[in-house]
Amino acid sequence: MIRLLLCLLLPGVLHAAPPNILLLIGDNWSYEHAGANGDKAVRTPVFDRICRDGMRFTNAFCPVPSCSPTRSCIVTGRAAHQLEDAASLWSKFPRKFRVFGDDLSKAGWHVGFTGKGWSPGNFKDFGRELNPVGAEFKDFGSYLEARKDKQPFFFWFGSTHTSLNKWKAGLGKERGIDPARVRVPTALPDVPEVREEIADYLAQVELMDAAFGDAIALLEQNGELDNTVVICTSDNGWQMPHGLAHCYDDGTHVPLAVRWPRQVKPGTVRDDFISLTDFAPTFLEMAGLKAWPEMTGRSFVDVLCGKPSGVKRDVVFIERERHANVRKGDLSYPVRGVRTAEFLYLRNLRPERWPAGDPELYFAVGPYGDIDGSRTKAFMMAHADDPAVKPLFEISFGKRPAEELYDLKSDPDQIVNLAADPRFAQAKAELGAKVDAWMRETNDPRAVDPATNVWDAYPYFGGKAKEPRATKK
């Protein structure tokens, strides 16, 4: 009876039973680093197949350029600033916040994950027995074995192949990735050391893609592929300067492809703006369940199924609070911003602080600790006074003004800040007004008090740096 009602309520979206859902989510994987997204140096046949068989999105963004806060937004469908501690990295996850997996489980779904779920952070000491994404399994195969008699399932496959600590020096060359073919973003120095590290990272992208392929092959072997929505994405951008922890596209623009047989037209490409915060209401709608009133994300089932809804999807809002604990006094670096097809506008609410972290080691990671310790970072710090590197060093490591504005048509890598250019005063004012309205409408504590230090006081569960690292001389 329930299934019949679902079919009547959602004609053309659900069949006799809701589809299974497989979420393939990479760790620190940027939008451009996939074959279907235009990268000529990397091979991603699995992601490319999902694009051919389904829908590829050109404007998918994480809500926060940081792992656990983005994952908090994914599981709750809410803006990060509504989630207290969970808006920051290495946080606690308060039990009071609802997660979509709990609703699926109550509705009879088999829910679980392998690899990186909601992480890093602490949920066990704050009222949750299970990870906010569900029960943990050794792998996808053992998860399917635990499934009861064709029970609908949601499985979160969290790869960590692309984490910085996996970037083995020389692996790119071993896998035949030519450093001469990689694209070096204009925020980074174009030197052999950087090209070789990018090649090593792309090698890990290929290994991640292959692991995702193994999961899809298991679905095919079990006859479940055409009954399953397969979603492939990443939690945030890569761990390079100007990337992870920073609100530029290198840190926020992520791949997204969705395969949904009989619903998504194969080979479709959409420019609609999708935030990963939209995932929770989308999963609930796919399951025939209702989104919750507190959700700020919006289901994009209408986009997937080509159904008009009247919802404009021409912007995404981006924010951050504390990433690593890298500023004296446990201080965050709060940012609120908006990304459109034409512009990226960022508001740095505490511009007197170092966006990349204090130049000297405070607690975690190292000097400038909101930039992870890549070989590229080490090169830039060692050559910070070289004429060719100095302006790039300032872009990623230096302090920033209260406002930033980038014209994406002329400056896709977001290098030239136009916030003070009178030619762009109207665009800046309009985008700033959008951010103000979003902050008010979503009850952002910083809409009332931009200088609030509430996030600085939340506990940080990440480890202390093992040893000081060399600072810029």
Image (cartoon, rainbow, N blue to C red):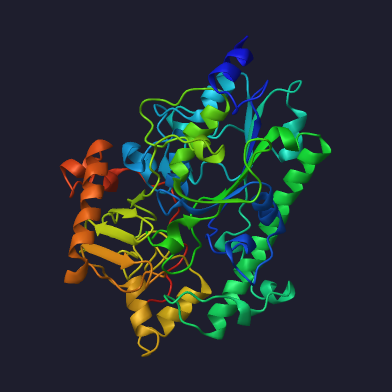
| Quadrant (top left/top right/bottom left/bottom right) for the N terminus | top right
- Say whether residue 473 is visible: no
Residue 114, above or below 386 = above
Q: Residue visible at 36% across and 78% down?
A: 393
Which picture quadrant has residue 95?
A: top left
| Quadrant (top left/top right/bottom left/bottom right) for the C terminus | bottom left
- 446 and 326: which is toward the camera: 446
- 440 and 334: which is toward the camera: 440
In the picture, measured across the screen, residue 299 lies left or right of residue 35, that is left
Give coordinates of residue 126: x percent, y percent. 43, 31
Which picture quadrant has residue 221?
A: top right
Residue 227, above or below 59 = above
**In this figure, what is the number of numbered marks?**
0
Q: Residue visible at 69% across and 47% down?
A: 53
- Say whether residue 172 is visible: yes
Q: Residue visible at 66% across and 54% down?
A: 47
